[in-house]
Amino acid sequence: MALSSYIDINVGERRQLLKIARQSIETGLENGQALRLKGTDFDGLLAATLGAFVTLTQGDSLRGCMGALQSADPLAQTTAACAFNAAFKDPRFTQLDAGEAKDIRIEISILSEMETLSVSDRDNLLRQLQPGIDGLLMEDGQYRSTFLPKVWEKIDSPTDFLRHLMTKAGLPGDYWSQTIQFSRYHTVSFAED
């Protein structure tokens, strides 16, 4: 079955998720914990069990990005947890402080369901990738890495996309094995003004 990139999210739901993400960061600054929501308070897409990523930027610079490829929690709670983790748990950055919080911009990416790709070799995988559309998850034993579709804005060739994905996992850029597995997904992304 072909992967659908359609995720029906209206303007009100987008605003609500951005507000939840901002509140979770503020809660983290106040008491060191993510915002906890009641799962019964939400309906529609906010109650769906979808994966999400929250990306924080300061100006044009990345300030944190964390997510969940899949989640058993409602999307509203997943968003709160991802926002907190992006602000305070991304190992690439120091924890966000109160002075920085007002200057960050929040972007949320909601993930579609995963589609397992059947690939025989590296060239076969590269032919299946849709630049600018596909997010990609690579798994091989203890190694796991993903790139959101947004990464295509900086890496436009499938060959480079795959090479960087392998490097991100701690593997050589030209790595391949008989046990390697790939899944693709699509996202709907939106951000604060």
Image: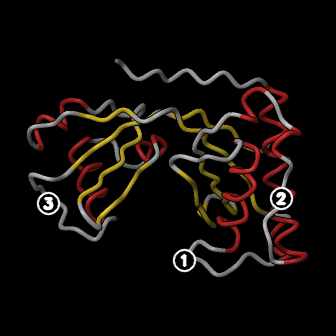
Q: Earlier in the sequence, mark 1 or mark 3?
A: 1
Image quadrant assignment for residue 153: top left
**CB under 8 Å between callouts 1 and 3?**
no
Q: Amino acid at mark 1?
A: Pro
Q: Write the residue at 69% across / 74% down.
A: 88
Residue 181, percent from left and from top? 24, 47
Amino acid type at image mark 3: Tyr
Q: Secondary structure at mark 2?
A: loop
Q: Secondary structure at mark 1?
A: loop
Q: Which residue is mark 2?
A: 36
Q: Quadrant of the N terminus?
A: top left
Observer-nearest of 152 and 180: 180
**Dot label at residue 175:** 3
Asked if disc 2 and disc 1 are in contact, CB closer than 8 Å, the reply is no
Rendered image: mark on residue 137: none
Please tell me which residue is depicted at 19% across the width and 61% down the height of the picture: 173
Q: Position of residue 127 (x, y in %)?
A: 18, 30
Q: Which residue is mark 1?
A: 91
Q: Residue at x 36, y 48 (%)?
A: 137
Q: Do labels 3 and 2 touch, CB within 8 Å?
A: no
Q: Secondary structure at mark 3?
A: loop
Image quadrant where residue 191 sits: top right
Closer to us: 82 or 157 = 82
Distance, label 1 to label 3, CA atoms, is 25 Å
Task: Say what amino acid the circle numbered 2 marks.
Answer: Arg
Q: Nearer the viewer, residue 64 or 69?
A: 69
Closer to the observer: label 3 or label 2? 2
Q: Position of residue 111 (x, y in %)?
A: 54, 38
Q: Marks 3/2: CA distance?
A: 41 Å
2 vs 1, front mark: 2
Mark 2 nearby-residue class (10 Å; few <14, some 14–19, many ≥20):
some
